[in-house]
């Protein structure tokens, strides 16, 4: 079994914010594979849908704990389904990645992303696969918190939709193969050819 976790904040006020990029990607993936809701919310602190890929069940997990406590939900799902940490892919936003790009890694530092910090604390390791979705750095003197919790502009929504498609392609590639091959194929790509790191 593989688990894909999208980080974000629950509730309609956060739906179109930059911080919910992980949820946007998973929503795209769920639609693509006609995923179905299956598991109870309260027990796992998440909304969980299931899909099948290459005859393997895949869990699509939307934590309901808010970003700063994402680790509570991820650890609950890991324990409940007895999933190996290497089979959990966490998808989140990242201000250090250029919009239109994704960055996939097998582990490493949280880099200031509070959801990743929480997961590290609750899993007891930094070594779990993650995919960072580029949202870019704040512009015009905007505070970082206001930036990540800000609503995507119309132009950003177009870029995010294309990025979510590419991210889903990368997730499918990971499900079909291995993380190293997925990193080699997708880490250098951009939906905006002119964008630089």
Image (spheres, rainbow, N blue to C red):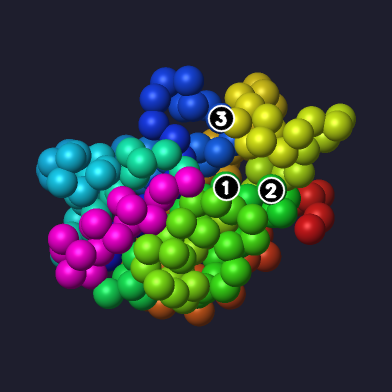
Label 3: how many Cα within 10 Å (few below 14, some 14–19, many 20+): many
Horizontal arrangement in the rendering, residue 53 relative to residue 176 (left or right): left
196, 88: nearer the viewer: 88
State whether residue 150 appears in this view: yes
Label 1: how many Cα within 10 Å (few below 14, some 14–19, many 20+): many
Q: Is mark 2 on a helix, strand or loop?
A: loop
- The residue identified by callout 3 is 17
Horizontal arrangement in the rendering, residue 19 relative to residue 195 (left or right): left
- The residue identified by callout 2 is 95
Residue at 33% of width from left, 39% of height from top? 64
Tell me which numbered mark, 3 or 2, is placed earlier along the sequence. 3
Q: Percent from the top left, x then y, of residue 147?
A: 69, 33
Q: What element carries label 3?
A: loop
Q: State whether residue 84 is above or below residue 148.
A: below
Classify the position of the C terminus by image quarter.
bottom right
Label 2: how many Cα within 10 Å (few below 14, some 14–19, many 20+): many
Q: State whether residue 18 is above or below residue 39.
A: above
Task: State the separation of the CA atoms marked 2 and 1.
Answer: 7 Å
Disc number placed over residue 93 in the picture, else none = 1
Q: In which quarter of the image is residue 40?
A: top left
Classify the position of the N terminus by image quarter.
bottom left
Task: State the separation of the CA atoms marked 3 and 1.
Answer: 10 Å
Residue at 23% of width from left, 69% of height from top? 83
Dominant SS in magenta = helix
Question: Residues in magenta?
Answer: 68-83
Q: Quadrant of residue 111?
A: bottom right
Q: Do the residues labelled 2 and 1 touch (CB within 8 Å)?
A: yes
Residue at the far right in the pictured view: 140
Horizontal arrangement in the rendering, residue 13 relative to residue 113 (left or right): left
């Amino acid at each position: 079994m593989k688990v894909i976790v999208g980080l974000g904040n629950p509730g309609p006020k956060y739906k179109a914010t930059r911080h919910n990029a992980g949820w946007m990607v998973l929503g795209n993936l769920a639609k693509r594979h006609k995923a179905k809701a299956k598991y109870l919310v309260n027990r796992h602190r998440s909304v969980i849908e299931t899909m099948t890929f290459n005859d393997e069940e895949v869990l699509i997990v939307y934590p309901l704990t808010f970003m700063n406590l994402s680790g509570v939900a991820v650890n609950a799902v890991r324990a409940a389904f007895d999933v190996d940490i290497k089979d959990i892919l966490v998808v989140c936003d990242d201000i250090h990645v250029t919009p239109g790009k994704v960055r996939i890694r097998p582990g490493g530092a949280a880099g200031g992303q509070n959801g990743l910090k929480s997961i590290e604390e609750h899993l007891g390791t930094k070594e779990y696969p993650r995919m960072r979705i580029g949202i870019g750095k704040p512009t015009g003197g905007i505070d970082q918190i206001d930036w990540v919790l800000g609503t995507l502009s119309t132009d950003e929504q177009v870029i995010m939709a294309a990025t979510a498609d590419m991210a889903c392609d990368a997730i499918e590639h990971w499900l079909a193969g291995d993380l190293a091959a997925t990193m080699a194929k997708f880490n250098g790509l951009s939906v905006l050819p002119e964008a630089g790191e």
